[in-house]
Image: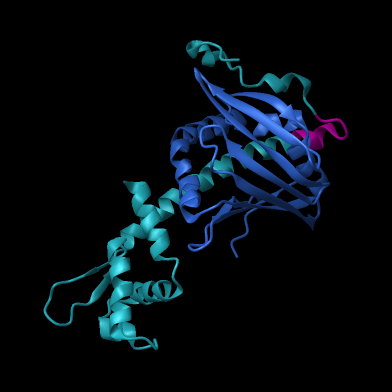
Amino acid sequence: MTSTTHPETTISAVPDLPIVEIVREFDAPPEQVFRAHVDRDLFTQWIGPRDIDMRVEQWDARTGGSYRYVHGRGDEEYGFYGSFHEVRPNERIVQTFGFDGWPDAVSLEILTLEDLGSGRTRLRGQSIVESIEARDAMLASGMESGVVQGYEKLDDLLAG
Amino acid sequence: MAADQLSRVFSALADPTRRDMVARLAVDDATVNQLAAPYDVSLQAVSKHLKVLEAAGLVSRSREAQRRPVHLEAQVFDLMTKWIERYRRQAEERYKRLDAVLAAMTEDGTETTQAGTTKRGTTQSSSSEGAAS
């Protein structure tokens, strides 16, 4: 319907399913979007907010591999880890996602890349968690990113 | 507290009949009888559903005599929308950063990593807290 050149991220949470779905399109072919997800250096460049130190402690983005990285801000550190269940080049990445601070709350992340032609890709990310409560907590974690909104403005300034 | 309310709202809306009732109340207030009309269930069952919606703060019932129309509390949806919007913004920001990375890849053609950029977390102004790296 409303078609902008850079459609923004859409999020959907079906009330009765413990799933959050994210859809976003990119001005790059699937090969590149895929590579930005599996190449350690490229991934490091975008996954965390600018003000955060990103330390990758383990990175093996292949089927059966695993990962672990730590975000640091001041004295605080947040570790994230998981396994790569399937890494299918340019099409699909299935992985688990865990947070040191809440080890019981694992989510299954299913990422699919759809080739839209003309060098564009539609990314669809599904996060599946154990319970509706865990899903709500995941959505609620967005609360903490209020801080991050400030950086959006900074990004705009730097880009402008 | 807001987290609890969000959970109650989501679980109240987990039921398709209750979602349907909410959709109808979005159009206009209605009495229990009016709400029950399209369903093949007892008035008691409809009242039960309404109690769940009421507990979640999604609907309210006025005290005016017998009719007691049910009213949708639209601001609760605003709360949900806000939470989801924050989450969305967080994702959008992440993907804007990915846009930039992808754009850099395109410019470079084959080999991508802008070698110097890996340590981009170290900005001039961020040294106040001491280096955690």
In this view of the protein, can residue B64 be seen by the observer?
A: yes
Query: What's the image's color scheme?
Result: by chain
Q: Residue furthest front?
A: A104
Question: Looking at the picture, does residue B26 appear above or below residue A2?
Answer: below
Residue closest to the eye, B11 or B35:
B11
Q: Does residue B110 show up magenta in the picture?
A: yes
How many circles with numbers are drawn on the protein?
0
Question: Looking at the picture, does residue B76 appear above or below residue A74?
Answer: below
**Image point 53% across, 16% down: which residue?**
B126
Q: Which chain is cyan?
A: B
Stretch of the chain drawn in magenta: B103-112
Residue closest to the eye, A78 or B75:
A78
Q: Does residue B72 show up magenta in the picture?
A: no
Task: Identify the image quadrant of residue B39.
Answer: bottom left
| Image coordinates for residue A18, horizontal then vertical, percent | 54, 56
Residue closest to the eye, A155 or A14:
A14
Q: Dominant secondary structure of the magenta stretch?
A: helix
Question: Looking at the picture, does residue B32 appear above or below residue A96?
Answer: below
In this view of the protein, can residue B72 be seen by the observer?
A: no
**Image point 14% across, 82% down: which residue?**
B66
Q: Is residue B21 left or right of residue B130?
A: left
**Image point 51% across, 54% down: which residue?**
A131
| Image coordinates for residue A34, horizontal then vertical, percent | 78, 43
Question: Looking at the picture, does residue B72 appear above or below residue A31?
Answer: below
Q: Is residue B38 left or right of residue A26?
A: left
Q: Is residue A7 left or right of residue B54?
A: right
The N terminus of chain A lies in quadrant: bottom right
| Image coordinates for residue A87, horizontal then vertical, percent | 79, 45
| Image coordinates for residue A114, horizontal then vertical, percent | 76, 56
Say which colour chain A has: blue
The C terminus of chain A lies in quadrant: top right
